[in-house]
């Protein structure tokens, strides 16, 4: 009898395997598909534009059910090589198992044509859309829909997880809007456009960029020009991401008196920033502390 029962009882569904190009999509995947086996190809101290197509990532992508990446050419320097070497038909461009979030959520700064000498720009728009909490919620909806398509047996679970998270997220949004009031109208100096969505959402004005052109490292001449341009200005800080070299920001700070603020641009579990909620809490905490210290 036990053998007969074993033959007719349904086998448990196999755990879904997710490959996230960046930690933000791994974190959202953990919320929407907590039973899934999830890997992030990059971390907070790594520039997502440039990573090595390591054998371990190739092996992981080879057995992935769903790959989730920012898109807008953020991963153009390494993802195609991974896809080719992994030879997994499920995660090739245009297939159901390959989700580019920037194709599902509207991006800012799109360009029909790239002018000559414009620098390292993204014609499809700024890919760092997860730093706008409203767009991150839209990304969550797109992810839950794709999860349901790839794994229809658990479709109801993915939709339920998204709806519950979306309600909690709205409550946090209301709280963040209140907390962020002192930051509206403040000025900031940046290095690259990583946090552009975040500044727009907060109502913070970017008055200078350490990069002379997008993706071009700071040059001595450009930094010297910034010293002159920033004379008499009182921006909140010179902000760079954790993965960026702080040398140029520190040089400018020493000559202008503007403080340097290093911020994570994504989740960093080893530093206690595990969930999307913790990321936005951390970013607001750091900016508000800088504001109060002036």
Image (spheres, rainbow, N blue to C red):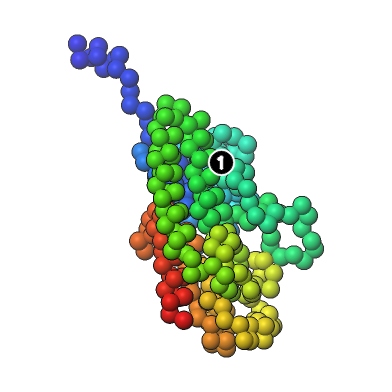
Tell me where residue 276 appears, x and y as whole percent: 43, 53
- What residue lies at 49% left-to-right and 66% top-to-bottom? 181
- What residue lies at 56% left-to-right and 78% top-to-bottom? 235
Displayed quadrant of residue 155: top left
The crowding category of the residue bearing disc 1, from other C-alpha atoms within 10 Å (few below 14, some 14 to 19, many at least 20), is many
Between 266 and 90, the one nearer to me in the picture: 266
Tell me where residue 234 appears, x and y as whole percent: 57, 81
Residue identifier under label 1: 99
Indicate whether 205 appears above or below 140. below
| Quarter of the image where the N terminus is located | top left
Extreme residue in the bottom direction: 255
Disc 1 is placed on an element classified as strand
Tell me where residue 144 appears, x and y as whole percent: 48, 37
Indicate whether 219 appears above or below 19. below
Q: Is residue 141 left or right of residue 14?
A: right
Q: Is residue 29 left or right of residue 116?
A: left
Between 191 and 206, the one nearer to me in the picture: 206
Tell me where residue 285 appears, x and y as whole percent: 41, 67
- What residue lies at 56% left-to-right and 39% top-to-bottom? 98
- What residue lies at 33% left-to-right and 19% top-to-bottom? 10
Between 135 and 224, the one nearer to me in the picture: 135
Indicate whether 23 appears above or below 13. below
Extreme residue in the left direction: 1
User: Across the whole image, how many numbered discs are drawn on residues?
Assistant: 1
Displayed quadrant of residue 202: bottom right
């Amino acid at each position: 009898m036990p053998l007969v029962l074993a033959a007719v009882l349904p086998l448990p569904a196999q755990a879904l395997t997710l490959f996230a190009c960046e930690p933000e999509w791994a974190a959202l995947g953990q919320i929407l598909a907590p039973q899934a086996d999830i890997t992030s190809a990059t971390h907070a101290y790594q520039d997502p534009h440039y990573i090595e197509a390591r054998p371990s990532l190739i092996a992981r992508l080879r057995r992935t059910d769903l790959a989730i990446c920012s898109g807008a050419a953020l991963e153009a320097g390494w993802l195609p090589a991974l896809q080719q070497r992994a030879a997994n038909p499920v995660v090739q461009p245009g297939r159901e198992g390959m989700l580019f979030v920037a194709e599902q959520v509207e991006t800012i700064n799109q360009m029909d044509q790239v002018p000559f000498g414009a620098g390292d720009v993204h014609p499809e728009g700024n890919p760092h859309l997860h730093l706008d909490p409203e767009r991150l919620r839209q990304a969550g909806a797109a992810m839950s829909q794709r999860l349901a398509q790839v794994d229809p047996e658990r479709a109801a679970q993915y939709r339920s997880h998204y709806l519950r998270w979306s309600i909690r997220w709205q409550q946090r949004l209301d709280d963040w809007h209140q907390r962020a009031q002192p930051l509206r109208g403040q000025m900031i100096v940046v290095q690259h456009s990583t946090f552009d969505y975040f500044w727009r959402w907060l109502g913070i004005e970017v008055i200078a960029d350490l990069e002379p052109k997008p993706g071009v490292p700071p040059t001595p001449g450009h930094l010297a020009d910034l010293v002159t341009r920033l004379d008499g200005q009182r921006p909140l800080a010179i902000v760079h991401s954790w993965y960026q070299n702080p040398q140029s920001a520190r040089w400018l700070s020493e000559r202008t008196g503007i403080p340097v603020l290093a911020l994570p641009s994504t989740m960093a579990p080893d530093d206690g920033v595990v969930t999307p909620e913790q990321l936005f809490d951390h970013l607001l905490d750091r900016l508000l502390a800088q504001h109060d210290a002036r």
